[in-house]
Amino acid sequence: MVYTGMVENHTYKMFIILFNTESFGELSKLYSVFKLKNGCELLSSRNYFSIVKEMLLEIRRITVNLYSVNDKFLNVTTTDDEINEHDLGWNVSNLMYSNYEKVIANIKLMGKVSEENVRDLLCKNIKKPITVLGKPTSEQMKFVKLFHK
């Protein structure tokens, strides 16, 4: 399930926004093998974006199997939209604190915190995974800086 716009439901306990950058477009050593009816095999290279997206969807499938169908644990949002100084629409309209205020309140890990503190925590949490995955690209760092004003 891929959303290119607004995160559709704000009642999820966890949401992940996967931004497809140049570094995710690099080809990995993994291949998908497709067997045709005539017996031939077709190899297709896999990029890191497709692998990470597949892993996230598998995590979501496992949580649905473990818990009730009515419990909404994970919402995965992926985008190819480029974010820069001239196009802040995706960033500003889709990641507004007010949209996720109830989600954050329902998590009940942080207690009472101000909007500014929550934004700061969210931004720090965006930068950490990028650093963990590898050397951040200039586009990834630009995204973090634009998100964290």
Image (tube, rainbow, N blue to C red):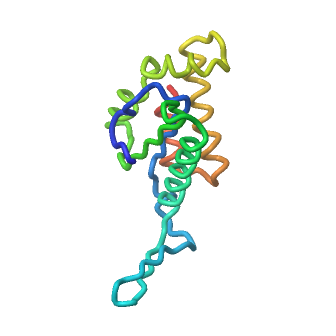
Please state which of residues 139 and 113 is positioned toward the viewer in this rendering: 113
Task: Identify whether 75 is placed above or below 55.
Answer: above
Residue 95 spot, x, y in % from top left: 43, 28
Task: Identify whether 23 is placed above or below 13.
Answer: below
Please state which of residues 143 and 11 is positioned toward the viewer in this rendering: 11
Specify whether 48 is left or right of 35. right
Query: Residue at coordinates 39% horizontally, 90% vertically from top-left?
Result: 39
Query: Residue at coordinates 63% horizontally, 52% vertically from top-left?
Result: 133
Specify whether 139 is left or right of 111. left
Residue 104 spot, x, y in % from top left: 55, 21
Snapshot quadrant of residue 112: top right
Residue 123 spot, x, y in % from top left: 57, 31
Residue 120 spot, x, y in % from top left: 59, 24
Query: Residue at coordinates 61% horizontally, 25% vertically from top-left?
Result: 121
Specify whether 45 is left or right of 108. left
Task: Identify whether 76 is placed above or below 106.
Answer: below
